[in-house]
């Protein structure tokens, strides 16, 4: 049922239809010579003047049109203003940004707090209605007194949101006698039912007797004063809260500019920490104290706690920034009322809404990136970057050997040429070719084209003697390499090695004793201890000792260097960064001093790309190296591009077995004799 007072505010309005007010909707008899409405009450006059485009803001002298989105009206004289105009007036008239008491430009009534823009009934969460200009279209619901008597009751205005004073309610006998009025005051609102005063450029000239004491303040106006004081406190602490419904565009951006530096500064500090921590994990040869110390485990726990705190901080602070940016964006697009400036009706509002949602989605992605990625990098970054560091590190090597499990009794050489194409600066290619492998009839151990070697330890009867001779106690690898049946022995105490060549002899009447059923494969593994006979020593040599002052070892007979070999069995974290260099390659024409300086620089500086003189390197792939240790070698001839010329270099050939076998037996010795590597490499970010 339509309220009986609705026609007073909505003439010729039909439910469900769009109201399109016209400038000529008021008859000529109801306007004066200046085009202003002559309606009998202020409510209708304001409404008609706005609809006809002749209602001006007293501050900027610009009209408040019928498409107004929001405004501010004094609750005493009911004069309407542009939100930006009254905002600047309140701020400049008090010379303060805190909004102490300021006066209405028209009636001089004092107001406290920020002038909140909205509709006529001062709601700020509603979309402007097309029914009445500046109205939210909802019930006014203002509380008023029926008069000025002693016992006047309070009633709620039933009209929809409207300009001017509410429709008065007549007093009854229960209201009692009239309250004595001070001289010069007015009873009721008869002043606003009288004809309008004279005009100057379309602006009402309010008589001097309309002052702050002319009207008794209603409960609503008193409440607005306290609300204004509360708004000031909210503005002061708004930047520390997640969101404040009364924040305007300026306050929102001030909060954003407060949060962004803190968010940026803290995350930059964390990124610096991540960079430092990752570098220490990826370059153990350069940070030996960290690698061998206990701080790496303590730092891992600190990173887990700091990551959780950083995630909460980034989420709360980032969400606060995004909500404020979203609100300000929608204010600028005219999707919600602005607290400081006009928000007129904006065409293509659906497009603006789509843009706002798209931008908010981008903001959410940025928040997720900051809130999740950086804490994850802090906790899991070293292992992830370790994986990236090792990818492609074996490109250009023709042989890969898996040394995953130090408990295994064998290891195999896989003839696997990786990449054939050339690389820029420096570039290398793999010369095609392979070694001949024995056929299945000749005792081939695998069907995958690999050379397999057993690892065993041989003890002498007098091995306990401190003055024992060479190879009184030693480790032996046995297998087939390049069609040759070989034994390679390593005396770890005397730093000696020897290679013996024999032949395979298999007794067909009892072939089972020549095979060992391995624990780690489905195929039969040869027992080379019984199969290889008629041994003859063909080569032997040594490797230099290492200590705290000399970390590098040299195989003089093979002219091979292993930098930082001293660290290989000191901590498993170093084992993925071992490299073997050929002596003299790439050092032609250099003096002895230059060679020493070059080696000192290049050997300590590990990098993914191999060098011309590098013939073997170790690596561990997967996250944090969890796939295990592998050895990559060049045993065939390879070419190298240097200064625009193609150079050929000999591969390791049979020499490969010496550094490779030494690494295999040292790892097995670490596990069986020293109890190291029993359960893998217990080092954060490394699982060898």
Image (cartoon, rainbow, N blue to C red):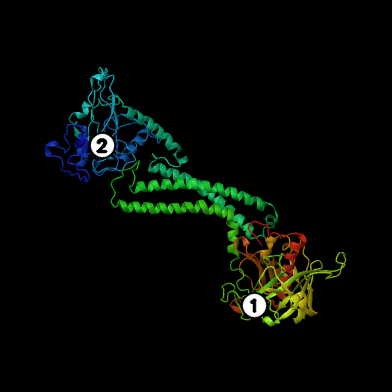
Residue 43's spot in the image, x, y percent?
22, 34
Q: Name the residue nearer the viewer: 225 or 597.
A: 225
Q: Is there any visible trace of residue 624 in the rendered image?
A: yes
In what element is the residue under mark 2?
loop
Q: Is residue 14 above or below residue 192?
A: below
Residue 273's spot in the image, x, y percent?
59, 52
Q: Is 542 displayed left or right of 310 in the figure?
A: right
| Label 1 packing within 10 angstroms: few (<14), some (14-19), many (20+) | some
Q: Is 346 displayed left or right of 199 in the figure?
A: right
Toward the left, the furthest residue is: 29
Q: Residue at x 43, y 42 (%)?
A: 243
Quadrant in which residue 291 is drawn: bottom right
Q: Is there any visible trace of residue 586 in the rendered image?
A: no
Residue at the disc numbered 1: 449
Residue at the disc numbered 2: 160
Q: Is 662 displayed left or right of 361 in the figure?
A: right
- The answer for how far apart the CA atoms under marks 2 and 1 are is 90 Å
Q: Residue at x 45, y 54 (%)?
A: 365
Q: Name the residue nearer the viewer: 189 or 596.
A: 189
- Mark 2 or mark 1: name the one nearer the start of the chain: 2
Q: Is 90 displayed left or right of 469 in the figure?
A: left
Residue 455's spot in the image, x, y percent?
74, 70
| Image quarter hosting the C terminus | bottom right
Q: Name the residue nearer the viewer: 512 or 64.
A: 512
Q: Nearer the viewer, mark 2 or mark 1?
A: 1
| Label 2 packing within 10 angstroms: few (<14), some (14-19), many (20+) | many
Quadrant in which residue 645 is drawn: bottom right
Q: How many marks?
A: 2
In what element is the residue under mark 1?
loop
Q: Is residue 596 above or below residue 535?
A: above
């Amino acid at each position: 049922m339509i309220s009986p007072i609705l026609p007073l505010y909505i003439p010729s309005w039909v439910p469900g239809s769009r109201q399109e007010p016209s400038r000529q909707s008021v008859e000529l008899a109801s306007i004066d010579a200046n085009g202003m409405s002559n309606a009998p009450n202020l409510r209708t006059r304001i409404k008609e003047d706005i609809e006809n485009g002749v209602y001006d803001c007293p501050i900027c002298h610009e009209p408040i049109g019928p498409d107004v989105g929001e405004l501010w009206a004094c609750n005493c004289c009911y004069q309407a203003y542009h939100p930006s105009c009254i905002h600047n007036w309140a701020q400049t008239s008090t010379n303060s940004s805190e909004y102490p008491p300021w006066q209405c430009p028209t009636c001089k009534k004092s107001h406290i707090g920020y002038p909140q823009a909205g509709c006529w009934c001062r709601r700020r969460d509603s979309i402007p209605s097309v029914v009445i200009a500046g109205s939210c279209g909802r019930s006014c619901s203002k509380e008023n007194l029926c008069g000025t008597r002693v016992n006047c009751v309070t009633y709620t205005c039933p009209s929809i949101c409207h300009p001017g004073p509410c429709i008065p309610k007549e007093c009854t006998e229960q209201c009692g006698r009239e309250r004595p009025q001070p001289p010069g005051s007015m009873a009721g609102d008869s002043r606003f039912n009288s004809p309008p005063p004279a005009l100057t450029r379309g602006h009402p000239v309010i008589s001097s007797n309309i002052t702050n004491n002319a009207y008794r303040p209603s409960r609503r106006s008193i409440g607005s004063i306290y609300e204004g004081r509360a708004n000031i406190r909210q503005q002061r602490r708004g930047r520390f809260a997640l969101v404040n419904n009364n924040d305007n565009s300026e306050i929102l951006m001030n909060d954003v500019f407060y949060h962004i530096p803190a968010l940026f500064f803290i995350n930059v500090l964390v990124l610096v920490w991540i960079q430092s921590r990752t570098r220490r994990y990826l370059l153990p040869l350069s940070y030996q104290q960290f690698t061998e110390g206990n701080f790496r485990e303590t730092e891992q726990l600190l990173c887990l706690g700091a990551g959780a705190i950083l995630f909460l901080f980034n989420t709360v602070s980032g969400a606060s920034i995004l909500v404020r940016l979203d609100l300000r964006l929608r204010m600028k697009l005219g999707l919600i009322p602005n607290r400081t400036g006009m928000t007129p009706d904006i065409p293509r509002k659906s497009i603006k809404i789509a843009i706002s949602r798209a931008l908010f989605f981008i903001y959410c992605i940025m928040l997720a990136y900051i809130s999740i990625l950086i804490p994850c990098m802090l906790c899991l970054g070293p292992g992830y970057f370790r994986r990236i560091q090792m990818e492609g590190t074996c490109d250009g090597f023709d042989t890969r050997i898996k040394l995953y499990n130090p408990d295994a009794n064998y290891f195999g050489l896989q003839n696997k040429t990786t990449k054939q194409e050339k690389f820029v600066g420096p570039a290398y290619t793999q010369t095609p070719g392979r070694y001949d492998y024995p056929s299945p009839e000749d005792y081939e151990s695998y069907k995958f084209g690999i050379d397999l070697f057993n690892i065993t330890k041989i003890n002498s009867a007098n091995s306990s003697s401190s003055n024992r001779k060479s190879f009184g106690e030693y480790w032996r690898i046995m297998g087939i390499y390049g069609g040759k049946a070989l034994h390679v022995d390593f005396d770890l105490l005397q730093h000696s090695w020897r290679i013996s060549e024999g032949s395979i002899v298999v007794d067909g009447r009892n072939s089972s004793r020549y095979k060992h059923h391995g624990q780690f494969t489905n195929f039969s593994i040869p027992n080379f201890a019984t199969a290889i006979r008629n041994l003859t020593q063909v080569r032997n040599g040594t490797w230099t000792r290492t200590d705290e002052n000399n970390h590098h070892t040299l195989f003089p007979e093979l002219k091979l260097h292993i930098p930082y070999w001293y660290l290989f069995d000191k901590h498993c974290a170093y084992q993925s960064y071992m490299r073997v260099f050929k002596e003299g390659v790439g050092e032609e024409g250099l003096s002895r001093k230059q060679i020493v300086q070059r080696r000192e620089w290049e050997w300590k500086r590990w990098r993914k790309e191999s060098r011309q003189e590098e013939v073997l390197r170790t690596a561990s792939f997967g996250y944090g190296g969890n796939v295990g240790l592998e050895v990559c070698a060049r045993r065939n001839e390879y070419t190298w591009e240097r200064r625009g010329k193609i150079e050929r270099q000999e591969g390791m050939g049979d020499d490969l077995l010496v550094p490779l076998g030494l690494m295999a037996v040292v790892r097995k010795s670490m596990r069986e004799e020293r109890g190291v590597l029993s359960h893998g490499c217990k080092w954060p970010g490394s699982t060898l």
